[in-house]
Amino acid sequence: MSTDTAARGSATTTPVATAVTTARAAYDSGRTRSLRWRRTQLAALERLLVEAEDELVAALAADLGRPAVDAWLADLSSTAAEARYARRYLGWWARPRVTGVPLGVAPAVGTWRPEPLGVVAIVGPWNYPVYLTLAPLVAALAAGNTAVLKPSEYAPATAAALHRLVPRHLDPEAVTVVTGGPAETQELIGAGVDHVFFTGSPEVGAKVMETAARTLTPVTLELGGKSPTIVDASADVAVAARRIAWTKLMNSGQTCVAPDYVLVHRAVVDEFLEEFGSAAREMRAGDLAMRVVDDRHGDRVRGLLADHGGRVVLGGDTTVTTAGTGELAGPGVDLTVVLDPDPDSALMREEIFGPVLPVLTVDSTDEAIAFVEARPRPLATYVFSRTRATIESVRDRIATGGIVTNHTMFHVLVPQLPFGGIGRSGMGAYHGKWGFEALSHRRPTLIKPTWPDPSLVYPPYAESTRKLLRKIF
Ligand code: NAD
């Protein structure tokens, strides 16, 4: 019995085991291979997002205090756009290809085509719990896989909504949803699935990879980290400050690609702080209190602010609630700017994932680049500059998941671009055809005729044959 079969056969009656067995049977039925089935599922996913909009928006509000417009923009429309794009192009992505072959292999035709992998386990985080659970599902379905989804336990209303809605709209055997925390996730990863698609923190990513390694289950890891932003002396500082403020405020900084900290040229740092403060106050109608997901995360962010060695130049109140700010009432932390914290402080070592922005003064682009390069590779790097040489230096010298110039984060919303990390910020990429490819196996088939079958290719080889073979191969 192969290890695969042994792992599959070990299923007991836990919800996770049942979900994997069900998804496996659906895959083995062969129905997911047809392009028609894949398109039908993607269309059904788009319908789910429209028909269940109110239910999902209510769940996101309950879990995260997310206003309806943000929920629609960040979670629903982004997922629908991925599904629509994949539905449109998957026929092209899945097409079989024909290639030539080297002389030594001729006559023959080489063909290859993307094949599904089988059952994909999708593990989501809490911060965009619809988008980051269902966008990987788009890739899995487009590539003809079945899937078991495990949404985050820290967005329980959304997890429950997905548990209810997904089987109602999609093929209920091909896409199953399990709920739970680390124990259930570990069980899922070790349950004989064919691929694990994980979005979450680097620390948990390492645990996921460790468990997956035991069964040689491949993983895609979409992780986090500290994404830096560089503002050089030539930048349009007002635009930079406004865009950084806007994207830092989104979901209270609890976004994997949020600008984590800013390296600002000394010549423009005062202007930057001034512009950032007024942009943020304007966007928040004067109230800097930002909702964080729960007290656990609130305490973590407060811990980062306890001892940073810098100067608080905006906000700083760490025990606020968000009643009356447009978000649902809940635990909060002021949008806080810390100028020149100690680079070795926890604030500058750990991913902030909250409404705190460290601003570090630098004297050159080289200094900024060296600062970033001395740290773990980030998920994204942003550079605001009107100088081509600066932009090119950042592009060529910083190893990072992605780069945006003169804005932040928006590469996430472009399905034509691969999205993923490098080093500690992740491995593998998805969105659009990149997700399709991540969850496909490129399988070659070499087609040989039975004739000709020259005897000279078979041993034993005469000296003259050896010379000829050396020329051909
Ligand atoms: P997390 O790593 O704590 O949890 C993610 C998932 O892992 C959850 O479903 C959770 O149940 C599961 N999990 C937790 N402990 C586990 C364990 N020991 N074994 C197996 N599974 C376990 O992440 P989070 O707090 O939900 O999200 C925040 C992190 O995710 C941040 O680091 C952020 O940058 C990152 N993130 C990355 C992306 C991206 O696209 N690269 C997107 C969003 C968030």
Image (cartoon, grey):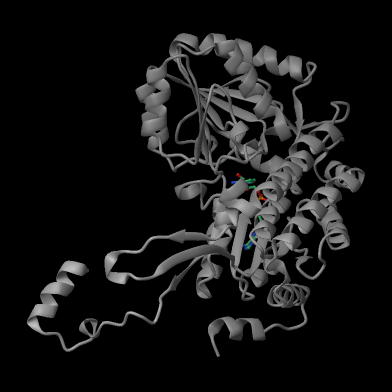
The N terminus - image quarter = bottom right
Left or right side of 227 for 180: right
Q: Residue 132 in the image: x percent, y percent?
A: 69, 49
* Residue at the farthest front position: 451
**Picture mark count:** 0
| Foreground of the two, 203 or 109 | 109
Does any portion of residue 292 appear in the rendered image?
no
Instruction: Name the image quarter holding residue 196.
Output: bottom right
**Relative height, residue 10 to residue 45 (above, below):** below
Question: Vertical placement of 216 versus 372: above or below?
Answer: below
- The extreme left residue here reads 463
Query: Is the residue 72 above or below the residue 30 in the image?
Result: above
Q: Could you tell whether 110 is left or right of 428 in the image?
A: left
Q: Position of residue 32 (x, y in %)?
A: 71, 67
Residue 213, compared with residue 344, is above or below; it is: below
* Camera-nearest residue between 369 and 195: 195
Q: Nearer the viewer, residue 362 or 379?
A: 379
Residue 467 visible here:
yes
For the C terminus, the image quarter is: bottom left
Q: Is residue 454 left or right of residue 410?
A: left
Q: What residue is drawn where x is 32% and y is 79%?
A: 452
Report which quarter residue 95 is drawn in: bottom right
Say whether residue 272 is left or right of residue 151.
left
Rendering coords of residue 134 (x, y %)? 73, 52
Please provide percent x and percent y for residue 353. 63, 39
